[in-house]
């Protein structure tokens, strides 16, 4: 049986946006955390580091604050220098239900100088003892629009770097999301009157910005956001004209109370919030923080 690793986590206040729902960047940090726990539990040898090359996340429904989640990770495929992981998040009290979020990442193993290196011996067999397969291929990014983007500036702050002193991949997504809102503010689209629900995120990391570097974030919208409709946001993070990160995300502009209907008014969100609260009350003192399957 192929290896799976699970842990439980309750969504914290600081992991949510101003609408009270889990952010994409917070879920990326869950993915980093459970991958590290899994590797530690498996006693993976080696002196190298893992860096992310590509992340694809699909969000089934918004996840409210204090929702008790069961997080799962597992191996999908391996090459000599890469490993692809899968991730799933479900309500902790309903681990057999369809996942609320599913994702996969392609990790590259690098040496102390940041150069790609061979995986530690028998790494693939730890996660796929039933037979090693290659990573699932990803769709290529579409051509970005020819028209001029909305361009905002950013800088890599101390709080955004990781153990290798690079811009952390979750911090890069926060940078993308902040730039997206900043680009829309000129059209008076702000969180005060607009609520965006994330559907899908695809991020490719080409290079690693470092502390103190000045960056530009270029954003395009297809189509331009309209209340009640879905739109796609295409983005580049560049340094001196070189693309460091590129991303494609799909969002739905949820109608808010300010425009006559509440995001929480639907029976779906009401029942989900009730289930999340019940799960939190019942399990927060009863469930061990992590387990292995």
Image (spheres, rainbow, N blue to C red):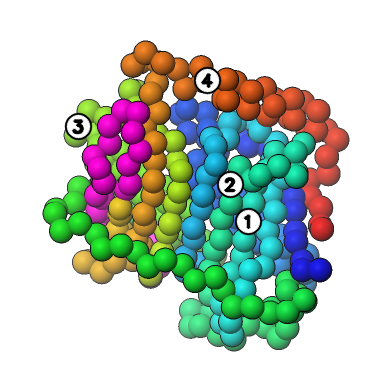
Disc 4 crowd rating (10 Å Cα; few below 14, some 14-19, many 20+) is few
| Badge nearest the viewer, 3 or 2 | 2
> Which residue is under mark 2?
101
> Which residue is under mark 3?
187
CA gap between label 4 and label 2 equals: 20 Å
Number of marks: 4
Disc 3 crowd rating (10 Å Cα; few below 14, some 14-19, many 20+) is few
| Viewport quadrant of the N terminus | bottom right
Q: Are marks 2 and 1 in contact (CB under 8 Å)?
A: yes
Comes first in the chain, label 2 or label 1: 1
Q: Is residue 134 above or below residue 41?
A: below
The residue under the point 24% across, 49% down is: 220
> Which residue is under mark 4?
266
Can residue 225 be found in the magenta stretch?
yes
Can residue 102 be found in the magenta stretch?
no
Magenta-drawn segment: 207-233
Comes first in the chain, label 4 or label 2: 2
CA gap between label 3 and label 4 equals: 28 Å
| Badge nearest the viewer, 4 or 1 | 4
Q: Residue furthest top?
A: 260
């Amino acid at each position: 049986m192929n290896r799976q690793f699970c842990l439980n986590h309750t969504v914290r206040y600081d992991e949510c946006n101003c609408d009270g729902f889990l952010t994409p960047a917070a879920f990326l940090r869950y993915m980093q955390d459970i991958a590290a726990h899994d590797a530690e539990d498996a006693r993976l040898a080696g002196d190298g580091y893992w860096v992310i090359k590509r992340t694809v996340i699909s969000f089934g429904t918004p996840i409210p604050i204090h929702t008790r989640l069961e997080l799962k990770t597992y191996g999908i495929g391996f090459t000599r220098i890469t490993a692809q992981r899968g991730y799933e998040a479900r309500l902790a009290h309903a681990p057999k239900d369809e996942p609320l979020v599913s994702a996969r990442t392609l990790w590259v193993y690098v040496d102390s100088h940041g150069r790609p290196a061979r995986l530690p011996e028998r790494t693939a067999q730890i996660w796929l003892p039933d037979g090693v397969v290659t990573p699932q291929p990803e769709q290529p990014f579409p051509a970005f629009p020819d028209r001029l983007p909305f361009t905002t500036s950013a800088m890599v702050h101390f709080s955004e770097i990781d153990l290798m002193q690079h811009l952390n991949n979750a911090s890069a997504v926060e940078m993308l999301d902040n730039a997206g809102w900043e680009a829309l503010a000129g059209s008076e689209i702000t969180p005060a009157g607009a609520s965006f629900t994330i559907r899908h995120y695809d991020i490719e990391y080409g290079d690693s910005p470092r502390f103190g570097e000045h960056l530009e974030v270029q954003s395009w919208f297809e189509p331009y956001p309209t209340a009640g409709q879905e739109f796609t946001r295409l983005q580049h993070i560049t340094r001196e004209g070189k693309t460091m990160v590129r991303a494609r995300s799909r969002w739905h502009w949820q109608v808010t109370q300010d425009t006559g209907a509440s995001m929480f008014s639907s029976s779906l969100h009401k029942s989900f919030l009730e289930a999340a609260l019940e799960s939190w009350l019942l399990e927060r003192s009863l469930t061990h923080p992590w387990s292995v399957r």
